[in-house]
Amino acid sequence: MNWTGVHPAVTTPFNADFTVDHDLLFRHMMWLLENGCSGLVMLGSLGEGATLEQTEKCAILRTAVRASQAKGTPVVAGVSSLSTNEAVRQAKEAEQAGCSGLMVLPPYVYASDWREMKAHVATVMGATGLPCMLYNNPIAYKTDFTPANMADLAADVENFVAVKESSSDARRAMAIREVVGNRLHISVGVDDIIVEAIAGGTRGWVAGLVNAFPRESVELYDLALAGKFKELFELYKWFLPLLRMDTVVKFVQLIKWVQEQMGCGSARVRPPRLELAGTDLKEAQQTLRRALATRPAVRSTDFQVPQEA
């Protein structure tokens, strides 16, 4: 399992009747990989995992594995449930579907102390032999896995090997390194601090706007890793207004809307989410219009229908 590089948190496209559009999903994932992405992260917050039935999740993972096998890249399955037993079932079914790793979330609603949260994530991680990433997003899920918690979990769970850090605190990567050294791979899960996070020791990016701008995202990551600051800051300055769409409540609607505008996806979202309207839509239109007027030379390829393997 390779945790480094740019891993899209892949969006889930829907047909008009809100069933999953597997054809568009497959084509989108192939396009992301062709533009340099290192792997696929499925069924996360951006993938609207909370609105999907388990049968739908399994079908999505099988489609992702089919795309990844054509490119030789890994698929990471998001595992999230209010019930530990259900999360264990999801983990096992992800392994059976051929996934390369798991991204384990805390329960969506129940936020408690470390004793209970450790028991939950350790049980889920221990349900398979797959390498596991802990998803820390205290802003969304009200549970903050601290560096000390991560060190405690790493001491007991051998296949806990990575962290997706989405606290929006650029200091966290170094704080984690301080207590675990190189025991854990660290990925950033917030788009608009990617440069700062890499400077602090992060080597993976579970990205959002990459769904619409994959080549630009990979270039930003590569420049940050190489320390090519002049080119890096020019691209980052251009990209930041778009990347900030990943940090607000309606990030799913915004990113899927940008995908639709760029011809590589659909803005359709499952209720209770609704598509953008009013001020939200106008602000998004202005942001994208400004970005396209000054688009950099590095660009993603046109979205086309690839041949299936």
Image (tube, helix red, strand yellow):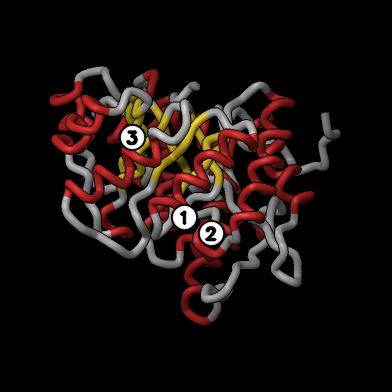
Answer with the quarter of the image where residue 155 lies: top left
Q: Secondary structure at mark 2?
A: loop
Q: Please state the horizontal and vertical placement of residue 13, each as a whole percent of the image.
A: 67, 57
Residue at mark 1 to residue at mark 3: CA–CA distance: 16 Å
Disc 3: which residue: 163
Q: Please state the horizontal and vertical placement of residue 41, each as a whole percent of the image.
A: 53, 40
Q: Secondary structure at mark 1?
A: loop
* 224 in relation to 134, above or below: above
Disc 1: which residue: 45
Q: Secondary structure at mark 3?
A: strand
* 281 in relation to 221, above or below: below
Identify residue type, mark 3. Answer: Val
Residue at mark 3 to residue at mark 2: CA–CA distance: 20 Å
Q: Residues within 10 Å of mark 2 (few under 14, many from 20)?
A: some
- Contact check, label 1 and label 3, Cβ < 8 Å: no
* 296 in relation to 261, above or below: above
Left or right: residue 6 compared with residue 67:
left
Residue placed at 54% from the left, 49% from the top?
Answer: 43
Residue placed at 48% from the left, 74% from the top?
Answer: 280
- Contact check, label 1 and label 2, Cβ < 8 Å: yes
Q: Which badge, 1 or 3, is on the more N-terminal residue?
A: 1
Q: Please state the horizontal and vertical placement of residue 4, each as a whole percent of the image.
A: 44, 24
Residue at mark 1 to residue at mark 2: CA–CA distance: 5 Å
Identify residue type, mark 2. Answer: Glu
Disc 2: which residue: 48
Identify residue type, mark 1. Answer: Ser
